[in-house]
Structures are given as structure tokens and as C-alpha cells.
Amino acid sequence: MKAFIEGNSIYLRAIETSDVSARYLAWMNDEEVTRGLASGAFPSNMANLSSYVEQIINSKSAVMFAICDQSTDLHIGNIKLDNFDWINRTCELGLLLGDRNYWGKGIGTEVVRLCLNYAFNQLNFRKVVLAVYANNPAAIKLYKKIGFQHEGTLRSQILYKGDYIDKHYMGIFSHEVQ
Ligand SMILES: CC(C)(COP(=O)(O)OP(=O)(O)OC[C@H]1O[C@@H](n2cnc3c(N)ncnc32)[C@H](O)[C@@H]1OP(=O)(O)O)[C@@H](O)C(=O)NCCC(=O)NCCS
């Protein structure tokens, strides 16, 4: 399928139900990938992953893109905007680079910038927010680098390996994107 948004090393296209593959399922059962996500507590299977993707595809208040390698077309993760609030013009961003071979190459940064440009300039949102756990320093660094501001913390909110860790909320307006 054609790119919907072109990047340098990656492009974004609409997610398809056919993207729910053994590879995608493996990401959702990889503890290193899910440690920063709400979905890590329960095992994923083809049935619940398929219905999650279908529900987003059919939603009028969410959009999810497959992140694909520009040179191979390999599906390496997803980025989504959801919780659309058309009155206050806000939405929430979620990012998953499932294929760990692609970590630490600046792809997360590139993808978030592309998605923010889409949110602000095509969907006309005013503000994008997200939640990030304290056990995810790479994500926190990435979001700060792009210009997200810390807006609040739910202290000791998330059970992680026997400890309760903080859940931070961050937000960004279009003029803050770096
Ligand atoms: C978190 C995630 C999005 C990062 O993507 P990425 O493409 O590896 O990120 P980038 O390479 O663009 O940038 C990460 C930054 O964090 C830094 N970093 C990496 N590991 C780090 C660590 N353990 N501690 C501190 N900083 C770290 C990198 O050096 C880089 O900073 P730099 O650009 O100044 O060098 C990716 O690992 C991922 O999808 N993880 C699984 C799902 C997830 O946690 N999603 C986010 C939920 S909020």
C-alpha cells in the first residue's frame, strides 16, 4: 500500500487487519517492548490483537499508522492518535516500535515529528498529549527533545517488577515542536 506520510528512513501508511501477523504478535509479548505500555500485563493473542486493530480502524476518534522501513517496506511498528476531542481540539499520541532492531536510530523521533505535523496541520488539533512511564527513559528523552512539556505525574501509579512507578503526562502545542 502507498505511503500516506513520507519520512526519510520510514513512511507511514494506514494500518490493515492483514498487518496483524506473527511478527506483530511477538512484539506484544516481548517484555522489553511492552514495559512502557499498558498492554503488557496480559498476554496478547491473534484474536485480541485483531479485534484491537479492527476497533481502531473502525473508530471515528482514532487513527493508527503502520510504520514501514522506506527501503524494504517492512512493518516495524505503529503510531496512533486517539481520544480525539473535537471541542477542545486535543488528542493523545501512542508509539510502538516493535522491531527492536530499529531502536536507537532516531526513528521514534522522526515518526513523532511526522505524526505531530499531521495532527496539527491536517487534523487541526491544538494540543497533543501522551502518557509515559518512569521506566522508559528513551521515550521521555525523545518526547522532551521534540518539545513535549511535563504536565503532571500520577505518583507510584504503575506496578512494574514488584515496584510502583510514576506515570507522567506530557503535552505539546504546535509552536513548541522542535
Ligand atoms: C521508546 C521508543 C519509542 C524509542 O524509539 P527510538 O527510535 O529508539 O528513539 P530515538 O532513537 O528516536 O531516540 C531515543 C533517545 O533516547 C536515548 N536513549 C535510549 N536509551 C536510553 C536510556 N536507557 N536512557 C536514556 N536515554 C536513552 C537515545 O540515545 C536517544 O536520544 P538521542 O537522540 O539524544 O541520542 C522505542 O524504543 C519503543 O517503541 N519502545 C517500545 C514501546 C514504547 O515504549 N513506546 C513508548 C511508550 S510512551
Image (tube, rainbow, N blue to C red):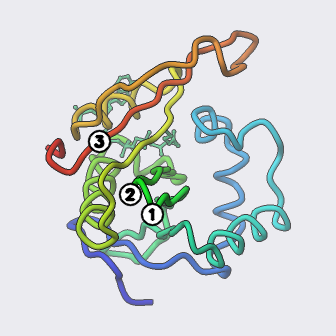
| SS at circle 1 | loop
Q: In which quarter of the image is the N terminus?
A: bottom left
Q: How crowded is mark 3: few (under 14 residues within 10 Å), some or many (20 or more)?
A: many
Q: Tell me if residue 77 can be seen.
A: no
Mark sitting on residue 172: 3
Residue type indicated by callout 1: Trp
**Quarter of the rendered image showing ligand 1:** top left
Q: Mark 2 points at which residue?
A: 89
**Residue 109 % position (x, y):** 28, 47
Viewer-closest of 29 and 142: 142
**Disc 3 residue: CB within 8 Å of ligand 1:** no
Work out how far the residue at label 2 is from the one at label 1, CA to CA, in angstroms. Answer: 5 Å
**Residue 59 % position (x, y):** 63, 73
Q: Would residue 128 appear left or right of 34 to someone viewing this image?
A: left
Mark sitting on residue 106: none
Q: Residue 111 is drawn in which quadrant?
A: bottom left
Mark sitting on residue 86: 1
Work out how far the residue at label 3 is from the one at label 1, CA to CA, in angstroms. Answer: 17 Å
Viewer-closest of 5 and 1: 5
Residue type indicated by callout 2: Arg
Viewer-closest of 65 and 128: 128
Q: Tell me if residue 148 can be seen.
A: yes
